[in-house]
Image (tube, rainbow, N blue to C red):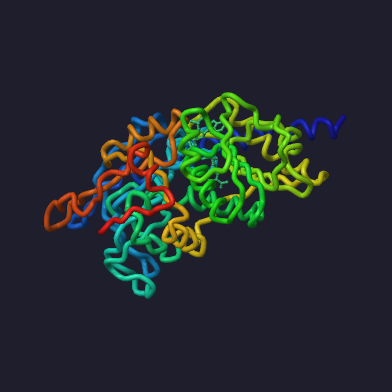
Amino acid sequence: MKWKRILKRSALVVVVLLFVWFQVAYWSSTNDCQRSIPPGGERMKAIKFCEYGPPDILKLEEVEKPVPKDNELLVRVRAASLNFIDAGLVRGPSVLRLMVGLRKPKFTGFGRDFAGVVEATGKDVTEFKPGDQIFGVKWGAIAEYVCVRKDRVALKPANITFEQAGAVGLAGLTALQGLQTGKIHAGEKVLINGASGGVGTFALQIAKAFDTEVTAVCSTRNVEIARTLGADHVIDYTKEDFTKREERYDLLFDNVNNHSFSERRLLLKPGGICVLAGIGSAGLHKGQLGRIAGNFTAAWRSRFVDQKFESYVTTSNQADLKFLSDLMAEGKVTPFVEKTYSLDQTADALRYFEEGHARGKLVIKISAVVTSTGELTPDEYVPATGLWETETMRSVGRPREVNH
Ligand SMILES: NC(=O)c1ccc[n+]([C@@H]2O[C@H](COP(=O)([O-])OP(=O)(O)OC[C@H]3O[C@@H](n4cnc5c(N)ncnc54)[C@H](OP(=O)(O)O)[C@@H]3O)[C@@H](O)[C@H]2O)c1
């Protein structure tokens, strides 16, 4: 009896302590939105979100221009793009808030993938110099300038526009590292579920670059795009369930996770690998939590069978960015950009992205910046690559000649 009473009281104390901790953490959760620019500080424009909410929460603000640390580059951003995680962070679903700020987002910058021109370098940077055209990954990339670590960028190939290079970062790395997780090699049969979005369009082209036979799964309106990007076979998921096929695959790159463990397992050859790359398209959609849970259980259950289900977390590293740069220079990968937006249209871009049917990447182009000497002209930009149907589809695998 005595022990029971002690246990009950201890549990009560834990609950009260947790409640107090949560209240303190919640109400002290804040961010840099109230911070003003110091007098004489240089200014730039950037997209920020100070609260969680729908796309309208994104604001184009004047903020302090960053100064590079010793191992950083100051980059004038020319193009940046949206990713699944950016959409999630703005809405701030409850599970995510434990990590990124309970009441308000801790980090208020928006976007991750970018391309631009090096404007200045820290004293420990010898690999890059002002004027270099680069692309990479940096939190808060949808801004006129970013400071980025020297090992988070690679040189932009000359045959790729800034808009295309600004689409690569996280999506390209996720596709490459996922296929590497699946131990991709020449001659394999690869199936990509969700082949027409940001990650999928990279995965499809990279898988082809590895000399594999690729089957792409997408909806009717994207069938032609998947073929143009190099898919050997395309399955329209609105007409056919790919898991009912007789065909067996070495590698299933699963961006969607909308089929059961058993269905996917049966689709794989003995020793085959299913890479758990994602949970479907951007935005908050019904069933996402179930898909996350499904990924965990699939990885665990596959320990006991012949086929492996592997999850991974994308990391930003220079070796992989260089690898992607080489693939683009060789014309094996051409970033697929469906639409481009201006900086002040970023909320519109996010609204469209959240609908969950973007094709390839959505890019924000940042064509002019305000400097101490005045407004720069919307310079050297090549025309928007937005209309894939008319322009880029014809040039896939045959890099466009662009003079910067
Ligand atoms: N592992 C990591 O570290 C990591 C990092 C980044 C991203 N990710 C994951 O990668 C996934 C994809 O991200 P993303 O940026 O490519 O998203 P996205 O651009 O929003 O993907 C949109 C695409 O998903 C397709 N889609 C939706 N439902 C589908 C279905 N039932 N079957 C096949 N395709 C379907 C849509 O095609 P239709 O219009 O034809 O339906 C659309 O083209 C996300 O779930 C994300 O979690 C993972």
Residue displayed at 70% across by 44% down = 249
Q: Residue 89 versus residue 286: which sits nearer the camera? A: 286
Looking at the image, the residue that sits furthest to the right is: 1
The total number of labels drawn is: 0
- Residue at the (55%, 51%) spot, across then down: 208
Q: Where is residue 376 in the image (x, y as percent from the top left)?
A: 15, 53
Q: In which quarter of the image is the N terminus?
A: top right
Q: Observer-nearest residue: 401 or 79? A: 401
Identify the residue at horizontal 37%, vertical 50% (top origin): 164
What x and y, as percent, mark residue 244? 71, 29
The quadrant holding residue 17 is top right
Give the side of residue 369 with respect to residue 35, left or right. left
Is 84 placed above or below 122 here?
A: above
Q: Using the image as rendered, state which of residue 240 and residue 14 is in the foreground.
A: 240
Q: Quadrant of the C terminus?
A: bottom left
| Along the line of sight, the residue nearer the viewer: 151 or 115 | 115
Does residue 31 appear in this view? no
Residue 103 placement (x, y as % from top left): 46, 35
Q: Which residue is drawn at 71% across and 31% down?
A: 260
Image coordinates for residue 173, horizontal then vertical, percent: 51, 53
- Say left or right for 369 vs 260: left
